[in-house]
Image: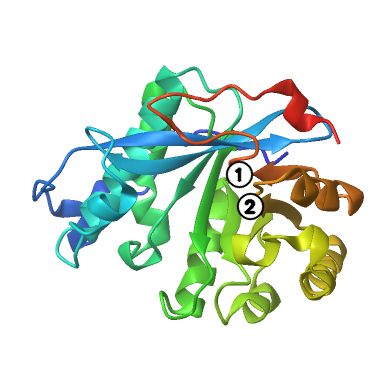
Amino acid sequence: MTSFKIHSQSERPEQSQGCSGCKDTTPLPLEIEFAFQPIVDISAKAVFACEALVRGANGESAHAVLSEVDDANKYQFDQHCRQVAIASAAALGLDAFLSINFMPKAVYRPEVCIRSTLDAAQEHGFPIERIIFETVEGEHLIDRTHLVEIFRAYKKFGFLTAIDDFGAGYSGLALLVDFQPDIIKLDMGLLRGIDTDSVRQRIVRGVLSICHDLGIRVVAEGIETKGERDFFIAHGVSLMQGYFFARPGFKSIPQIDKAAYLP
């Protein structure tokens, strides 16, 4: 596991180095909370991580929340989400990894923009080494060079890194050439009905082989049936996420039925 030492004040990025986004205190137009969805480790029969999924204060959908985010408030939104996710996970006593989605376009200078995350982790006593930063791999969402710069900076700080929805966009394999994250989460479109679909099986086997060779862990995301789960068990994938195990818990960490771990 990657280790990380909390920066002392002298080691942290100076406040004066902050970009314009760091200094913008414009209030957000909405309050946010989080739902948490477990990522299970089949082999350990335990929760490996919980993904923090943004919701409105009364449980409104992520779509409803994100529709209020624009270029004027994206930085404050991204920073606020990180802080609330960490505070909420700590308050719930999460003793697994915490996976936080981030918006690459809201990260201007990774080494400076990470300051509030470090502060939140220290304030709430949440271990830095248990934070995963994940984002989608679609090249239409972010310049790949900038994303690689962010990932490299986060890895240097000691965070784990993950690519979500791998296989849904166009830049996934090209991105792996430039940067190898700790984790990739296979897009659920590749998983649906994979136990009876030979084309999906061939494609996923190829991805699994590449990840194995590169030392990247794979999360099978969107598991909904026993057949889908069993396919990945048979192919050595132990990390899984989906409704088969648990739906997201609003302001709570769902319990996993032990039977869901059994093949």
Considering every residue shown, the one lying at the far front of the view is 196
Q: Which mark is residue 221?
A: 2
Q: Name the spot of residue 234 as percent of width and height, x first.
A: 91, 50
Decide if residue 233 is on the left or right side of residue 224: right
For this rendering, which residue is in front, 206 or 96?
Answer: 206
- Which x, y percent locates residue 168? 57, 72
- Amino acid residing under circle 1: Gly
> For the point 68% across and 73% down, which residue is it?
176
Gap between marks 2 and 1, in whole Å?
Answer: 6 Å
Q: Quadrant of residue 146?
A: bottom left
Callout 2 environment at 10 Å: few (<14), some (14 to 19), or many (20+)?
many
Specify whether residue 187 is in view: no
Residue 259, image quadrant:
top right
| Residue nearest the viewer, comparing 161 with 34 | 34
Q: Is residue 111 above or below residue 233?
A: below
Is residue 234 among the parts visible in the rendering?
yes
Q: Which residue is mark 1?
A: 242
Q: Amino acid at mark 2?
A: Glu
Question: What SS does tag 1 mark?
Answer: loop
Q: Characterize the local packing of mark 1: few (<14), some (14-19) or many (20 or more) Cα atoms within 10 angstroms.
A: many
| Vertical position of residue 27 compared to residue 127: above or below | below
The tag on residue 80 is none
Q: Is residue 94 above or below residue 184?
A: above
Q: Position of residue 20 (x, y in %)?
A: 18, 62
On screen, residue 26 above or below 107? above
Residue 10: x percent and y percent? Answer: 39, 39
| Quarter of the figure that contains the C terminus | top right
**Is the Cβ of the residue at disc 2 closer than 8 Å to that at disc 1?**
yes
Asked which secondary structure carries label 2, the reply is strand
